[in-house]
Image (cartoon, rainbow, N blue to C red):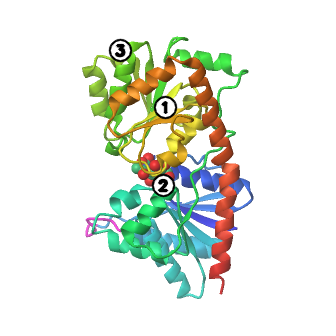
Amino acid sequence: MRIGITCYPTYGGSGVVATELGIELAALGHEIHFISYSQPFRLSGRDDGIYYHEVPVSSYPLFEFPPYDLALASRMSEVAEYYGLDLLHVHYAIPHSVSALLARQMLAARGRHLPFVTTLHGTDITLVGLDRSYLPITRYAIQESDGVTSISNYLRERTIADFDITRPIETITNFVNCDVYTPISDAAQKEKACERHHFAAPDEPILMHLSNFRPVKRVGDVVRVFARVAQERPAQLVLVGDGPDRSSAEWLAHDLGIQSRVHFLGKQERVSELLALADLFLMPSELESFGLAALEAMACKVPTIATRVGGVPELIDDGVTGLLYPVGDVDGMAAGALNLLNDPPRLKAMREAARQSAQKRFCSSLVVPRYVRFYEQVLAQTAK
Ligand code: GMT
């Protein structure tokens, strides 16, 4: 198939999923065309079967708000025509599904058929879509999509209820490449010990957090949980990523007097290598429709201490592959982390269970074929 993929190309879970999906589909022999305002950050630019088409947005003085959604619709229709796309797959409903809808209509007027699939990721529904000004158009674009998928049952049900959706939505969960996101092998143990040495002494556990540091991630709680753990035993905290709440988290680490044990790494390219160094992952979010970073950690044999929100219980089996707490329960999360760190056999069992669950339920080799079947269904249903 020739598939056009549109996503937010910068840091963020939906862009990661879209890019990894494109890479996996290309590896299966499909031709993938990314259409976006900049190259998705996980693309090297030289992958076989993957093409990137930039969307130029003109900044004419009259345009106080340059119309990206219109420029995107134009580029989608051009790319579809010039490269013979079979289908578009847009990640994040706003504004991508609206642009795809326009592109489909523009091509239909010229006698060309271009169905599109929308994948809902989370904040496109839970935050942005429920802003009254975006609700009618988001609802319309979801209803009019040729296929809609959601990354968790939670998000699927919430979309149906909040947007009064009457069309089917299929849950296809996020996935991870279990060959890239791997635990440290015995052979690599020695080399990794050197890397680990940058952050921690051999007997010090590493707690890790990875996100875009938006308020919904509650990065302050990450620092507070760690402070309580560090009061009881030597440990180090590594934070990967960047975003609006980074400086307040840095301030908090100083204020709590733990700054020497807290490492802010900023945006990093090979997060799989960092995750594999961790003993525990912290995800105390206000809301997660799935929690991709926790899945990436699980695949690296790292259990997560998380909040029981949104789609997280569909990913983390409480007490088996991680521990779940109410939002803001810093004491509970710290106690849970300490219990695990002080009980090596239990931590080891949880590490094994986390990897096994990632492998059995969320490996790209299992999930990506579901997308392929979904595309085939959409193409069959919409064929004239
Ligand atoms: O919160 C983020 O990291 C970004 C956001 C996005 O859409 O880019 O993430 C959402 O999609 C991710 C990938 O499907 C999910 O793993 C996240 O749970 C979801 N975030 C929220 O629901 C808050």
User: Quadrant location of the N terminus?
Assistant: bottom right
Q: Compare marks 2 and 1 and give the one earlier in the sequence.
A: 2
How much space separates mark 3 and mark 2, taking CA atoms?
44 Å
Check contact, mark 2 vs mark 1: CB within 8 A.
no
Of residues 170 and 40, which is closer to you in this image?
A: 170
Residue 297 spot, x, y in % from top left? 55, 35
Callout 1: 10 Å neighbours few (<14), some, many (20+)? many
| Within-10-Å neighbours for mark 3: few <14, some 14–19, many 20+ | few
Q: Give coordinates of residue 375: x percent, y percent.
A: 65, 69
- Residue position marked by numbered label 3 in the rendering: 231
Residue 156 visible in the snapshot:
yes
Question: Which residue is located at x 56 percent, y 46 percent?
Answer: 42
Q: Could you say which quadrant of the image residue 191 lies in? A: top right
Earlier residue among tags 3 and 2: 2
Q: Judging from the image, what secondary structure is the residue with disc 3 in?
A: helix
Span of residues in magenta: 61-67
| Left-right relation of 357 to 262 | right
Q: Is residue 251 above or below residue 49?
A: above
Amino acid type of disc 3?
Answer: Gln
| Depth order, front residue of 366/323 | 323
Q: Circle 1 sits on which residue?
A: 281
Residue at point 57% right, 18% down? Answer: 344
Q: Dot 2 corresponds to which residue?
A: 38
